[in-house]
Image (cartoon, rainbow, N blue to C red):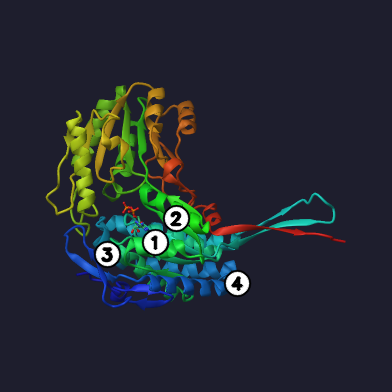
């Protein structure tokens, strides 16, 4: 059982229009602890009518909330941020229990989640418009920024708090209201945030968290004419379906979808930094992030040294339950995730990949996969085509820069890319040639609230974080004042 200082942060209820709801009271969805497989709790399976109630209350709240000054909206977000920090330990415990990541990583994610509340709490005051010199002397042209309206947010399980505030904070800062559907594996983090949002003074209806069947809830949100915007983070397959469905009401859409990040190590790289960056980028959250390095492309001259050092570092990692001291690597989210990793590794081995570490399940629990290093990986193997979402390093050897770039860009995804070099000219050339929305140069940890996060190609569109993040939740209205005497 969870030992929380504030037991009321753990809610087995949805949050609809500022009220805790158990839906029809009969239908529930169980939530499991991925480290043990034991049931952690349950959340109600809301009906379509419950979701429509959440949308209606978001719409009612919007009428008032949009009138608030940016400063007043920001003050609520900043208060919410300080409450999250105050209860960081409880929030991290809830996250580790439902998601599996080591407690230290969960605490780091709470800081990350808070950073969006702080950033957009400040940005709420800076939703600036423009004045434009008019073509006629008796006209005045201005552009004002206004909130989009009621927004739907659909979030994944890999960052149960971070993905919530990354969407909700800019929406609320802009003056929108939100109905959020968290991933079924990790609803409790989102619900705990609602407890604190309410305490911070967020008005009823400004944020609802709806739980239950993804397809039914998704349809209710997307078919609604009241909902004017969808922000989705998840798989490319689901993102495509939702984007198509949003055409029905011509919603504004932002999509943060899958990735297939290349991590290129050139001969002239600093080996220590490259190994450190590889660990940071690959093993965060046991490899379950959309910016995790998926394909390691390593130049022939540094290949063996890099593989040896990385293998050594991987062997030193401690896998176990996230609540145990010193654990650096937790379980995969569920059995399906484990089976996917097993399938990818088996396919790579059958086509000639060599295993330097791992390559099998780990005895710590039912969904643990040992950290793994594979070499001799080629682009005919599924592991280079699909998002691994597990702790597996797949290394391909290359000879020159042109070959590395061709391999790196040979994917329908375009979220993050990384490369290591000490050549200034190469760093500029390669940065510009990579078809990705985010590039880490001699850096493996790129996520921060101050920079625009988002992909190109089938990794989606729209930016989260940074001064651009709020654009996704505001419209520019052009005002032409005529006949000025
Ligand atoms: P993942 O592989 O990370 O679970 P998904 O795209 O399946 O990726 O899930 C991301 C989010 O999208 C989750 O909240 C999930 O419940 C939700 N989701 C999945 N299918 C649908 C759907 N048809 N309509 C709406 N939401 C969906």
Marked residue nearer the N-terminal end (3 or 1): 3
Q: Which residue, given by chain and number where applicable, does mark 1 sit on?
A: 218
**CB atoms at circles 3 and 1 under 8 Å apart?**
no
Q: Nearer the viewer, mark 2 or mark 4?
A: 2
Q: Which residue, given by chain and number where applicable, does mark 3 sit on?
A: 93
Q: Nearer the viewer, mark 2 or mark 3?
A: 2
Q: Is residue 460 left or right of residue 135?
A: left
Where does residue 451 sit, x and y in percent of width and height? Answer: 49, 49
Where does residue 171 sit, x and y in percent of width and height? Answer: 50, 62
Q: Residue furthest left?
A: 363
Mark 4 lies on a secondary structure that is loop
* The N terminus - image quarter: bottom left
Dot 1 beta carbon under 8 Å from ligand 1: yes
Which disc, if any, is residue 245?
A: 2
How far apart are labels 2 and 4 at the CA level?
A: 31 Å
Marked residue nearer the N-terminal end (4 or 3): 4
Q: Which residue, given by chain and number where applicable, does mark 4 sit on?
A: 67
Does any portion of residue 312 appear in the rendered image? Answer: no
How far apart are labels 4 and 3 at the CA level?
A: 37 Å
How far apart are labels 2 and 3 at the CA level?
A: 36 Å
Dot 3 beta carbon under 8 Å from ligand 1: no
In what quadrant does ligand 1 lie? bottom left
Dot 2 beta carbon under 8 Å from ligand 1: no
The front one of 272 and 243 is 243
Where does residue 386 sit, x and y in percent of width and height? Answer: 31, 40
**Crowding near the residue tagged with mark 1, few <14, some 14–19, many ≥20 C-alpha atoms within 10 Å:** some
- Whether 29 is drawn above or below 357: the answer is below
**CB atoms at circles 2 and 1 under 8 Å apart?**
yes
Q: Is residue 404 left or right of residue 171?
A: left
């Amino acid at each position: 059982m969870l030992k929380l200082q504030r037991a009321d942060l753990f809610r087995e209820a949805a949050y609809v229009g500022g009220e805790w709801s158990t839906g029809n009271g009969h239908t529930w969805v169980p939530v499991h602890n991925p480290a043990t497989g034991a049931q952690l709790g349950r959340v109600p399976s809301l009906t379509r009518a419950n979701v429509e109630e959440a949308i209606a209350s978001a719409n009612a709240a919007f009428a008032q909330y949009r009138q608030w000054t940016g400063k007043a909206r920001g003050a609520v977000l900043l208060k919410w941020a300080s409450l999250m920090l105050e209860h960081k330990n409880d929030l991290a415990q809830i996250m580790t229990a439902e998601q599996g990541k080591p407690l230290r990583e969960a605490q780091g994610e709470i800081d990350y989640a808070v950073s969006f509340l702080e950033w957009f709490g400040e940005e709420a005051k800076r939703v600036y418009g423009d004045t434009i010199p008019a073509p006629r002397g008796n006209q005045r042209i201005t552009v004002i920024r206004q909130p989009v309206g009621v927004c739907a947010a659909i979030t994944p399980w890999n960052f149960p708090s971070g993905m919530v505030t990354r969407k909700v904070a800019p929406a609320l800062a802009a003056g929108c209201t939100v109905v959020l559907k968290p991933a079924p594996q990790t609803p409790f983090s989102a619900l705990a945030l609602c407890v604190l949002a309410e305490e911070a003074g967020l008005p009823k209806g400004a944020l609802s968290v709806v739980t239950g069947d993804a397809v039914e809830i998704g349809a209710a949100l997307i078919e609604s004419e009241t909902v004017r915007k969808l922000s989705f983070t998840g798989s490319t397959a689901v993102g495509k379906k939702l984007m198509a469905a949003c055409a029905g009401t011509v919603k504004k859409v932002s999509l943060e979808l899958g990735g297939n990040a290349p991590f290129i190590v050139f001969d002239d790289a600093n080996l220590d930094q490259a190994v450190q960056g590889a660990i940071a980028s690959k093993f965060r959250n046991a490899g379950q992030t959309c910016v995790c390095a998926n394909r390691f492309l390593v130049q022939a001259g540094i290949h063996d040294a890099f593989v040896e050092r990385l293998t050594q570092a991987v062997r030193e990692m401690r896998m176990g339950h996230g609540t145990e001291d010193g654990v650096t690597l937790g379980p995969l989210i569920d059995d399906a995730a484990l089976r996917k990793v097993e399938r990818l590794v088996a396919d790579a081995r059958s086509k000639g990949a060599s295993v330097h570490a791992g390559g099998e399940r780990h005895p710590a629990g039912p969904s643990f996969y040992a950290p793994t290093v594979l070499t001799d990986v080629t682009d005919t193997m599924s592991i280079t085509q699909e998002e691994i979402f597990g702790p597996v390093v797949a290394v391909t050897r290359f000879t020159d820069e042109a070959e590395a770039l061709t391999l790196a860009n040979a994917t329908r995804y375009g979220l993050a890319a990384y490369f290591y070099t000490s050549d200034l000219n190469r760093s500029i050339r390669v940065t510009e040639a990579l078809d990705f929305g985010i590039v880490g140069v001699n850096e493996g940890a790129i996520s921060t609230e101050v920079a625009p996060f988002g992909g190109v190609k089938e990794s989606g569109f729209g930016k989260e974080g940074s001064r651009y993040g709020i654009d996704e939740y505001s419209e520019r209205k052009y005002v032409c004042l005529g006949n000025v005497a």
